[in-house]
Image: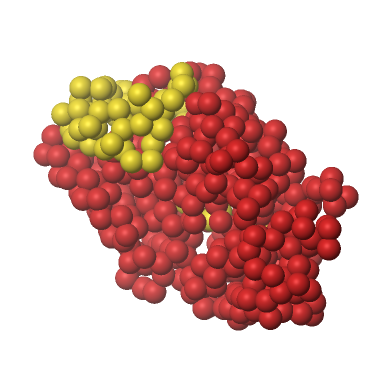
Amino acid sequence: MLGRGGAGFPAGTKWGLMPAGKYPRYLVVNGDESEPGTYKDRLLMERDPHQLVEGCLIAAYAAGLSQVFLYIRGEMPLAHERVAVALNDAYAAGYVGKNILGTNFSVDIVLHWGAGAYVVGEETALIESLEGKRGEPRLKPPFFPAAIGLYGQPTIVNNVETLSNLPWLLVNGAQAFTAIGTATSPGTRMVAVSGHVVRPGVYEIVNGTTTFRDLLYGDEFCQGIRDGNELKAFVPGGGSAPWFTPEQLDLPFEGKLVGAAGSMLGSGAIMVMDHTTDIPTAALTLTRFYAAESCGQCTPCREGGTWLERVLQRVVDGRGTHADLAQMMEIGESICPGAFPHAASERLGLAATPFPYKMTTICFVGPSAYAPVHSALTLFRDEFEAKIVERRHIPVSIEAVGAH
Amino acid sequence: MSSYPWAAGYIDDGDRPKLVTSRFEHEDSYTLERYHATGGYAGLRAALGRTPAEVHDEVRGPPCWVVVVPGSPPAPSGA
């Protein structure tokens, strides 16, 4: 059972990282789904809150935990309401609380409402927020809160979708679970597709075997690009993931393969851009988000994200220079030194640079501000050139640039 | 049926396994009554019938080595 929150870390292995004999130990449920393009956990909480509660109880039992904290993003009031009612009902029915179903197993579940900060999706920032502090990621090491987490105690942080899988897994068994998907990516996963497809939405797909082409063009999924347009690019794993182009369509939802191809599956959000998309503007939209969501702790993120946004805005407005393009890459280098992941491009004669990247920040927010800039500049530099040379606004097509 | 007014955005066309969205077709999928009617809390009962270590092993799967490289970027959110 691989975690579904972004890292794809094996859930059972994570539970085993807690030091022996140290109690109390906590389970924190990360329901602070905030990655741009991602809206699958919200549906799971709104439509099947008892499944999540049951998953929490199974995890608590297996890992020897007696206290669960369910942290739900502040902008999801219906999810909060539904989970609250489900918890009350589960307490009343004897599923949660003391001596559950007549056994010696006892667990309390506390519901906590977030305040709407993207960075709190990072597990140590979420823990800080739960402790009543400002939601800022903690310095590493320790790399995992399993060692030192909430209130300094061993803490497991699991994603909503990860825990929602546990009831099915316990009823049907690991063998049935691993029979779906591949050996390295078993089960299903939820994906949220947005952008220029005929039928955007949330789909539960088979992990490891479904390809991006299946998802974007399949009749049972997104049914192709809107208006019969051409696919230009897509973000395969949430706003912070490096972009792919049609050349990567045949990759399956398999973390290792996607990583080697220069991106990540991340939070399961796929954002699709057709050929009418103004690439620099699309990059600006994402970079602006991450610049605004920086907690301000790390200088490369706080200053770098802000400057990336300002310089990119200037280019998009048609007031940029070639020096601005070089400067954006230089700013990015200060956040992520060395080679940054990107997809291969036959058109450009580029080989892929695999995931992950190095970074000078505590968490991923700074690199996330740079990812769209780097992808757009690496794969669609001609569109930036057009903005600078021709001072043109949308739509800037590759063909038009080539003809210039 | 491919989508439901009460689960806006969710689409379930095709004959695929549904591990976490099997109840989305029911308008009252969020209630305890529906959860019971569709096998809810059977996983917890199954877990309580075993030892915590057995449940842990069931989720963890076969033993494997996990290499954690210091300095590698953390996940965007809880795994």
Task: State how many labels appear.
Answer: 0
Residue A322: quarter of image:
bottom right
Instruction: Check the image and report above or below for A75 versus B56.
Output: below
- Chain B: its colour in the image is yellow
- Quadrant where the C terminus of chain A sits is bottom right
Q: A278 or A345, which is in the foreground?
A: A278
Q: Which chain is red in the picture?
A: A
Farthest residue to the right: give it.
A349
Q: x%, y% of residue A339?
A: 79, 61
Quadrant of the rendered structure where residue A150 is? bottom left
Q: Position of residue A244 (x, y in %)?
A: 69, 48
Q: Depth check: give the residue in front, A11 or B38.
A: B38
In the rendered view, tell whether residue B45 sits above or below residue B64: above
Which of the colour schemes (rainbow, by chain, secondary structure, one colour) is used? by chain
Q: Residue at x 56, y 41 (%)?
A: A227
> Please, which residue is most extreme toward the left here?
A92
x, y percent for residue A375: 70, 58
- What residue appears at the point 39 percent right and 56 percent down from the top-left corner? A32
The quadrant where residue A319 appears:
bottom right
In the image, is A301 to the left or to the right of A106? Answer: right
In the picture shown, does residue B6 fall above or below A305? above
Q: Residue at x 45, y 64 (%)?
A: A118
Q: Quick check: can you spot residue A235?
A: no
- Picture coordinates of residue A74 (x, y %)? 31, 61
User: Is residue A392 shown to the viewer in this render?
Assistant: yes
What's the residue at 26%, 37% (across, down)?
Answer: B6
Q: Is residue A229 left or right of residue B51?
A: right
